[in-house]
Amino acid sequence: MNDHELDDALREAAQHWRVPIDPPLDAIWDAVATEAFRPRARRSPGWPAVGIAAAAALAIGVAGGRYWAGRATVPIATTAAAPHAVAATAAVNDPSQQAMGELLGRTAVLLAALPAESSAPAVDPQLSREGARLLTTTRLLLDAPIGADPRLRNLLQDLELVLAQVARLEPEHRRDEIQFIRTAVDEHDIVPRLRTAAADLTHDDF
Amino acid sequence: MSPGSPTLSGIPVSNPARKMPSVEIAAARPADDREETRSLVALAAAGDLAAARTLYDRHAGRVYRLAYRMCGDRDLASDLTQDVFVRVFGQLGQFRGEAAFTTWLHRVAVTTCLNTLRKVKRFRGREVDLEHASDRGTGGGDRDPVLQSALGAAIDALPEGLRIALVMHTIEGYTHAEIGAALGIAEGTSKSRVSEARALLRNALAPHGKEYHDE
């Protein structure tokens, strides 16, 4: 085949080889518009964010555990020689402080377990039951002496609002309810404050 | 005819598709059109759907046609076109205008096509059948269908770098400058790839030369 023949064949190919018939450009546009320009819904936290939240919950739990373990293993025999340890042991025995540590850890876990998408079809009933239990604890602590600390009181009041919403979640919740909870958690910086409060509790700052 | 227009050994290519407004070569557009494109890009980047649609209408036909020529499958060409524009619109905020929008768009298009086709090599088996269907559907022209079929198979058998250059230049009418920009190669490299592709096609179609000539 010479150049002239090849040119003729290629010219034919340009006009007849794989020429798309009636390309579905409108349908493609619909898909493009949906995918590229859909409303910028709040992005799902996804697995990395859930992992971070779980890690934060774990850190809070570990911090609380260290706090209680450290306090509880103070040998009684040394208390006479170390008066400050007596005070520490007394702190361990403060049920409200103990409940506070547990509340912080369990609330962090609960918030990490919230469905990632507002469109999630159903909520595990255990989630709302746990929310109700933590809500009760929160209200008790608000009325306890530990709830008089301004920083803790503020956090407990915000937790009360969030946990009340979680406690009211029905398995077939409205689409926007999870979104309301997440917005409240974000706007009030609940998770970072939980973490800070747990760290402060460990260092006995309250 | 501009100096950069595609030719077959000096013969101007008569490609009816190139007469469509959406396939005009960007370099040939007047400056005010380029300015308008810049405005449309800025608006689309800000989420203006109408501006995005205008950009899409201008370029989608050409992108789709290139994808279809490369893969020979209507659904895959649709998916490729969709992927290209989703990527382009998703990255408009990062488009700083160093290159012409069209150049950038076609770079994304070529990269998307080649990457996807590498992943779906199994499509090659289907392409031959689809290619026959396509040829019949468009009337087939005056030439020997056996030769056209052999030509299609020979084009598909070309190494990827040569095939994309040949299809873009000889079949779709891109200039070597556009191909160079889209593939990230020098203009001269594009020319040599097309030349090499033609040499391979001549060899592959040698048995058909006499039949073709005798018609």
Image (cartoon, grey):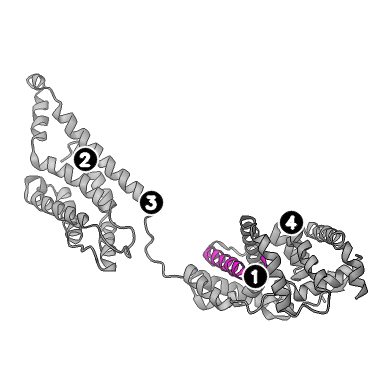
Which residue lies under the disc numbered 1?
B63
The chain that hosts pointer 1 is B
Q: CA distance from mark 3 to mark 1?
A: 35 Å
Q: CA distance from mark 3 to mark 2?
A: 28 Å
Local packing at callout 4 (Cα closer than 10 Å; few below 14, some 14-19, many 20+) is: some
Which residue lies under the disc numbered 4?
B161
In the image, residue A192 above or below residue B58: above
Labels 3 and 2 positioned on one and the same chain = yes
Quarter residue B157 falls in: bottom right
Q: Is residue B85 magenta?
A: yes
Q: Is disc 4 in contact with disc 3, using a CB cutoff of under 8 Å?
A: no
Q: Position of residue B57 (x, y in %)?
A: 60, 77
Q: Residue at x 15, y 44 (%)?
A: A100
Quadrant assignment for the N terminus of chain A: bottom right
Q: Is disc 4 in contact with disc 1, using a CB cutoff of under 8 Å?
A: no
Tell me if residue B69 can be seen.
no
Q: Amino acid at mark 4?
A: Gly
Quarter residue B38 falls in: bottom right
Q: Residue at x 86, y 70 (%)?
A: A7
Q: Amino acid at mark 1?
A: Val
Q: Position of residue A82 (x, y in %)?
A: 11, 22
Tell me if residue A106 can be seen.
yes
Sequence-wise first label, 4 or 1: 1
Q: Residue at x 12, y 31 (%)?
A: A88
Quadrant assignment for the C terminus of chain A: top left
Sequence-wise first label, 3 or 2: 3
Secondary element at image label 4: helix
